[in-house]
Image: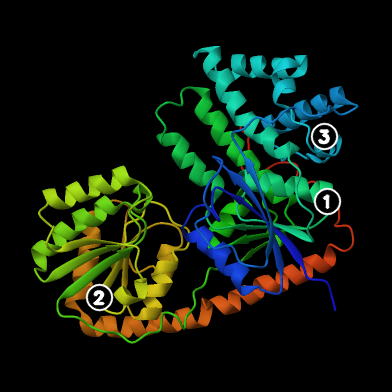
Amino acid sequence: MAARIRVCLLLEGSYPYITGGVSSWVHELIQALVDIDFVLFTISPEEDQEPRYKIPDNVVEHHDILLSRVPPPGKAPPKKKALLQDIKKIHDSMFSGSIPAIDELIERMPVGYFLHKEAINSSVGWDMITSQNQLKNPVYPFADYFWAWKSAHDMIFTVLGAGLPDADLYHAVSTGYAGLAASTARIRKKKPYILTEHGLYHKEREMEIRKAAFIRGYQRDMWINIYNSLSRLSYRYADLIIALFEFNRRMQIDLGAPVEKTQVIPNGIDTGRFSGERKKRDGFHVGLVGRVVPIKDIKTFISMAKIVSDEIPEARFYCIGPTDEDERYYEDCRILVDSLRLGKIFEFTGRQDVREYYAFLDVLLLTSVREAQPLVILEAYCSGVPVVSTRVGNVPELLDFDERFIASPKDAVQLARGIKYIHDHPEEMAELIEKNRKRVYQFYDRDTLHQRYREIYQRYAAAGQQEPPPSGPVGQQAPEASAGSGGL
């Protein structure tokens, strides 16, 4: 009997501690591939978190590292000066806009050795910090730059020095620090590395950074460059790069992912689970399935409900999902419902079996300001519910680029128009509902997509029995990079 394949999943700030789309995808993948053993390597922002999922039996190990903790430095390598010079070369490469190689750095750095102190105590490290501050950040205090630089690099050093468990292949579910860890595994373990991006990590972090008022001067550019560089490193060392949809695949290529390494595998749903009988209720029912958190922009849903209720008096609204992840935001939403006098027609349901609501909803609404490929749209289609949504992620493609049902984020008026159109055109909607249901069965059946991952694991695990080819340069210049645009 052949040995079971052992896959190490590298996860940053998600499964098994946080619920949501990525975590659900990971949990379902593990449960589906019962013939494969999984090892979890999780990168966490805080310690002693309680898992939000019951860990499946085929998860055979779980290693968790705390990203914000500075570990003891460990035993220094015999050629420490050469190691520091490697770091300088990597920075110089990034500042010239190239995609750097980190093979020599990783091979010189023993597992358990961490560069936190050497980065600021050595003459090489200190010269790098001060020279870049003078070049990039001359107006603002040096202390601001120093602590921002140290914070960013401490997390990188924590990941670079961490030991990873043995596996037949390594599968990162984002770039960022998870992708960096997978890249080090690719170099140290000589095993294949697969990357699946649900969203685009560097773009998501950039949005957060640009909204942060406390980040001043060059610090903002530095953080953005770091996350761009981490994604480019991930693309360089990954043997296979998977996006959920074509637009994101093209954006990966624009940042340096080799075309021949990329492919699209969408998310899917259990079509049988969402094919229940419709149980129509009197009135007109609009639901949003999602967590009550700012990224889902529940406040725009509430504002839209006010507009629709003025035109469709029989309309009722349901916010279906957990309310305990951001209690302050939930309270703000409740106050908004009361201030708009929607209390009798707007309900926060909390956690529910969403199928009970899909059975009678007339419209599913998404008001998110950021999504990748929302599974709730596929669930609604399979359940016979039309969708109106903001223009985020793969939503336009899922909605067949039909502008009647797509609005810019926070555009409550246009969302309301989409809802009203569905209300006023029941016969046309019946045809659209049937068309959408067929699309889901044809392209988004979860079992079929899980089988694709099983085949990928089998193929790359077999290839990993021989030493993978060296990573090699992925071009000397990243597309659209310019001198000084990259770097840490």
* Amino acid bearing label 1: Lys
* Amino acid bearing label 3: Met
**Relative to residue 147, is residue 244 depicted above or below?**
below
Q: Which residue is mark 2?
A: 362
* Amino acid bearing label 2: Asp
**Relative to residue 226, is residue 294 depicted above or below?**
below
Q: Which residue is mark 3?
A: 109
Taking depth in this image into account, of 286 and 373 the one nearest to the observer is 286
Q: Measuring 51% from the left and 76% from the top, which residue is drawn there?
A: 444
Q: Are marks 1 and 3 in contact (CB under 8 Å)?
A: no
Distance Cα–Cα, label 2 vs label 3: 59 Å
Q: Residues within 10 Å of mark 1 (few under 14, many from 20)?
A: many
Q: Looking at the image, is mark 2 or mark 1 earlier in the sequence? A: 1
- Secondary structure under tag 3 reads loop
Quarter of the picture containing the N terminus is bottom right
Quarter of the image for residue 84 reads top right
Q: Is residue 474 visible?
A: no
